[in-house]
Image (spheres, grey):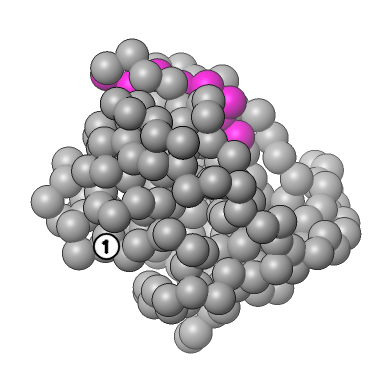
Amino acid sequence: MVLGVATVALVVVAALVVVLVVVGGGDEPGAGPAGTSTTGTSSPTTATATTTAVEPADGVVVAGTGYAFHLPDAWKDATADAAGLEGGDGIDVLVVLGPSVEAAQSNVIVEAIPAGSATDPDDLESLWRSNLVGSDGAEVEDVDDIEIDGQRAIGVRIPQRTNGEGLEFTQVAYLALHGGTQYSIALTFPLRGDAVSEPDFERLLASWSWTD
């Protein structure tokens, strides 16, 4: 299915910056396979995890600062192109669903910056959520905690957002701490007509490994 002129936003959501950049839409490859990841629920004091079977992605390996993961089918490493985008200096890894940034249907951005004195994602949650909301005051919903290669990650979902061209998209993001670094991992995909990006994101996260 061709999404035509539909676009998504390139969203940089690290601890200090939020930038929205329009990138071009592309084709929807079709329904992807359901994917092994660990999910859970959180409370103000505890988090309990349950395991849901998700098949890890097994495509090309993408390596970032202290981590690596496999790409799902039809995804491409576009990190080399990030430097030329507004806010691109804050991106550690950028991968896109499609042949290029300009023709991407969806994107995943990973940001990696020092965590300072924080020892748990909860220590940074308020600032992280504030930056995700940005200047447009987007509605943010909590999602269950997950484990990313054994590391607890807190998550949020922004069900609907509108870019500068009036096109609507959805975002799902997780925040994890590992080795003194905070990692913000965010998926952005079209609000309508996309049946593959979220399952692919789960498969990507299920393939994640810490390398330091």
85 or 126, which is in the foreground? 85
In the displayed orientation, state which residue is furthest to the front.
1
Residue 5 vs 49, above or below: the answer is above
Q: Specify the segment rendered in magenta.
A: 157-164
Q: Quadrant of residue 139?
A: top right
The residue drawn where x is 37% and y is 58% is 95
13 or 157, which is in the foreground? 157
Residue 22 vs 147, above or below: the answer is above
Can the viewer see residue 37 in this picture?
A: no
The residue drawn where x is 39% and y is 41% is 27
The three-letter code of the residue at mark 1 reads Thr
Q: Which residue is mark 1?
A: 79
Q: Estimate the x, y position of residue 88 in percent, counting from the top left.
A: 21, 50
| Label 1: which secondary element | helix
In the displayed orientation, state which residue is furthest to the left.
84
Helix, strand or loop for the magenta stretch, by majority: strand
Determine if the magenta segment contains residue 131: no
Determine if the magenta segment contains residue 160: yes
Judged left or right of residue 78, residue 54 is: right
